[in-house]
Amino acid sequence: MHHANPLNLNRLGPAEGRYAGRSRHFSTARREMEKLDMKTPIIASGFALLASTAMAQDSVLIVYTYDSFVSDWGPGPQIEAAFEETCECDLQFVGAGDGAALLARLFLEGAQTGADVVLGLDTNLIASARAMDLIAPHGIDAENLTMPISWDDPQFLPYDWGYFAFVHGTDLENPPSNFRELADSDLRIVIQDPRSSTPGLGLLMWVKAAYGDEAASIWEGLADNIVTVTPGWSEAYGLYLEGEADMVLSYTTSPAYHLIAEEDDSHTVAAFEEGHYIQVEVAGIVNISNEMDLARQFMDFMLTPAFQEVIPTTNWMYPAALPAEDLPAGFETLVVPEIPLLLGVDEAQALRQQALEEWQAALSQ
Amino acid sequence: MASRAQPVSAVQRAGAAIAALVLLAVLGPLAAVLWRAESLTGLGPADIAAIRFTIWQAFLSAVFSIVLAIPVARALARRSFPGRAALIALMGAPFILPVIVAVLGLITIFGRRGVLNEGLAALGLPGLEIYGLHGVVLAHVFFNLPLAVRLFLQGWLAIPAERFRLAATLGFTPRDIARHMEWPMLRQVAPGAFLVIFLICTTSFAVALILGGGPRATTVELAIYQAFRYEFDLGRAAMLGLVQVGICVVAGLLVLRVAVPAAMGTGLDRPLERFDRQSGVQRAGDWLAIALAALFLILPLLAVLLRGIGGVASLPGSVWAAAERSVLLSLATAALAVVLALPMAMLIARGRARGLLETIGALSIAVSPLVIGTGLFLILRPYVNPASSALPVTGLVNALAALPFLLRALVPAIEAAEAGYGPLADSLGMTGRQRLRHVVLPRIRRPLGFGAGLAAAMSMGDLGVITLFAAPQSGTLPLEMFRLMGAYRTDDAEAAALVLLVLSLLLFWIFDRGGRVNAAT
Amino acid sequence: MLRLDKVRLGFDGFTLAVDLQVAKGARLAILGPSGGGKTTLLSTIAGFLRPDSGRVVIDGQDVTEKPVQDRPLSILFQEGNLFPHLTAFDNVALGLKPGLKLTEQDRADVARALDQVGLGDMGARKPGDLSGGQRSRVALARMLLRRKPLALLDEPFAALDPGLRREMLSLVGDLCDAEGLTLVMVSHDLRDAERLCTDLCLLEEGRVILNGPLQPMLADPPDALAPWL
């Protein structure tokens, strides 16, 4: 029980353990939780759980994260239990839509924020987060990271990462091996909008990182392959599963879900020669937190196996600090791109507006 | 009738107070965003393009919804057949479904691998593409046609039975009936129906983008989303929110110029019996309209049913807990919506500041839920814990969102009641609550039941403000469904969507039925 | 002119069983308590209700199976005789051509009918701008214009004050004389019947209690008529 029961209307869901057997197997999470309703697109944020029912003797650590991290199928419940075993504290997750919504919530709250730690921003959001001047240096020597790129950001520490990739059925003949082949093919793809979705933004950066000034012409070539652009990951993936498109922008780890949770090996990803853009998910300590020590303790915990081992089959991403041999069975079948791509935080920020305009111009014709 | 002199009653004072409250609840959050932004950001060419597209697609969607609803409502008004009531209730379903569920349902029928295209392919015909402006309009018609049908159906049933008898004695042809009885009714109902559908389509976002096929289909709502989420530009968001208010006010003023006040006179309530001769062609036309509408609306729902049915038994407990929460929230929302709408509708029916009040009523669907949610968050954050205020705030916002629909349904009925029995009530000195209880309520049970059902069902399917305030373990059913979808758990998500559909329909049906018990019409 | 031949009609525990004849040019008042079956009887003659058995004959023609619009009659209802969005002129003209595609001759006829009821200069007004008496006159004008031999009146002037009602009744009488109409009027007031009608039919619990020429009955009232005097 993490929190007060508003209006007594909500019977809390089952204790985490009750479905543990299933959830270990089936659960997953996704950074994209944008709700999209004609009447009511959602708004940033989740909610702050201020103190409420915390056990009196314990200190409380409040971690803002994206909604799917804390859902019954996300890593949240297991991680909370594991951390509370060691910290003698009350860890409270506050879910706030998707990664962008999380940052928007932080922005709206500013110096009044109730968060001690923010967990779930991705590389494309770091520059904006830094500009808010709310994140303290983490002071942790992250030498055991197992990512294919180096990481030395003083404020943001990664906890998981993944390669963006186009998922397709294994029955697809001659899958493209680069963007140009894709553009020249008759394949139909679904992508996400970079203005409302972090994978969408990731794809924008992928094309920019791989093709630079030629990005605009790549988009022009892709325009007739794109069935449609969705506001978030869920809709795009849903359309793909529905058969509306041959391929969908997702992650190289997506087939792992189908394989491990559904015992379905009919999905794979196309390996692109120009390399695959990486999404890194990070956490940071809020610099006005009253629980600095506890927050650091959580950041340390984040890179330990107790946290990292939960990630692959709940978040369906690669853990940031777990050797490949410790990954669950099934992960070894995944396509591993040869070239990891990632623009520097400031570089990505500088290129974003131009890339967005190129994208919009090419697809609006 | 428009301005009979009479004392201002408690109910009318309440109506005015509620109107002020509604205005505050809509514009207050916008002001809060603006205040926080400190200055407005000018709009760029992309914003202008988004505004143009938003208005154009909403206009087309509203026009098609209205035009197509007329023959369907007419056919339903004059044909009786077994299952008619069930069909009418089912037709309420699309309006209350979460967008993504409805879109996937539509795609099962109209998509690339959809039933329609498979059928065309089997006949050797070229396939149809759903993505594009026509796809957006198709989806919006799917959502809003049933609403328009219901509003028109109410209108048809409100035509006094005497008038049909008179028409019969005068030997009216169907054309004459259309001209002298149906057209005046349509002129009374259509502008208001057009306005609410137009406005609700102006805040469309996911449907427009998904079915619009790409950034060509960028709406104001998406621009607001982008401003909030990725640019942290509250000034631009507030500016776009003001644009939405502007669209609403202009559309409201234009529409109300076209609208004519009710002049239906009064009649004894009797089931719609018609004595006019109807040709075989007409009868065939009616059946065709009913059949096409039923297929168009029900096939996608059937798709939702078929996909979901297998997974219902194995749904996780959290989904059922969320369902319970959603039902309670819906009931509270419906009650609140009725309490807000009734006094306002009575005030409007009295002809006082009609344009202003109707526009205020419509504002709550014209202004982005994103802006309202963010504004409320900014206002409430310093005083209350967002988590503990999640459900009350959601109830309030949902009730506000249902308000225009309730007003649409209630105002004509109250006007008719007042036109018929107002003078009598005046002569007896009945005002305020007495008048409400004895003159108005007995004659508006049907639209009231419909409106309350709609409010409850809309609240069931709504995935709006709750995401902003809710705790992870206190999500509503649609939120839970979306979480499942975001976690790859498509089967569970489809089962949850089915539960949502069934519960929404059930709520709607109970209220709607309740309105008809012992009501003659 | 009008014959109801063993007409029987039952619903909701109520049964109407009537045998009735009305001579051409006669003016029959149907009198009786509420719920006695007056309006049911009128609706049966008009064709809004179909009898379970028996025949309705008008002008020698069996109309039992005919819809309202094919019967040679006009009706004035208690209320709702006029369309509120049409002018008095158009409301009258509906009696000639529901489509309102009027020839010069039609317009002249409508104007004449309005003149006959004393509303020659009110044609442009809408019902909302007319008094109750004037509205009744508009409806009456339309009835005249339709030139149907049988006129049915369902307490059409009940809402008017006594003076106005007297005036309307005598106007109806004059018009019936002028046009040679046969008339059946439902009423709950013997005095109204006396003013206009030649015959009387007293209806209670769906059955005819009294039936015959009015004047002899008034001269020597049978017991059944006592409560109505």
Image (tube, grey):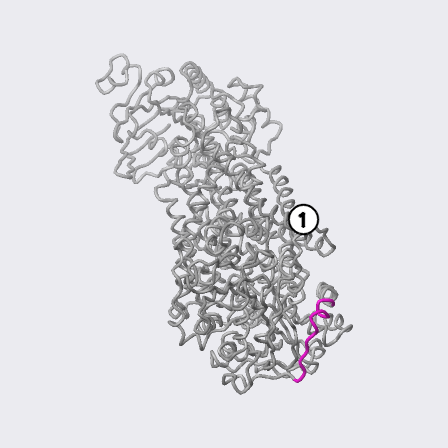
Q: Is residue A285 left or right of residue B163?
A: right
Q: Is residue A257 visible?
A: yes
Residue C100 x %, y %: 57, 33
* Residue C91 image offset from top left, x and y in percent: 53, 29
For mark 1, name the chain: B
- Residue A347 is inside the magenta segment: yes
Compared to residue C169, the image places residue B134 above or below, namely below
Q: Quadrant of the C terminus of chain B?
A: top left
Nearest the viewer among A114 and A244 is A114
Image quadrant of residue C196?
top left
**Residue at the disc numbered 1:** B38
Residue A212 in the image: above or below residue B50:
below
Amino acid at pointer 1: Glu
Residue drawn at point x = 48 percent, y = 41 percent: B341
Q: Is residue C151 visible?
A: no
Q: Is residue C32 left or right of residue B243?
A: left
Compared across the picture, whether B281 is left or right of A151 comes to: left
Q: Nearer the viewer, residue A12 or B111?
A: A12
Residue lying farthest top?
A: C219
Neighbours of disc 1 within 10 Å: few (<14), some (14-19), many (20+): few
Q: Position of residue B246 (x, y in %)?
A: 65, 44
Q: At 61% from the left edge and 30% from the top edge, which residue is drawn?
A: C103
Asked if the magenta segment contains residue B342, the reply would be no
Extreme residue toward the right, this view: A213
Judging depth in this view, the residue of B494 and A43 nearest the camera is A43
- Quadrant in which residue A185 is drawn: bottom right
Q: What's the magenta region?
A: A338-350
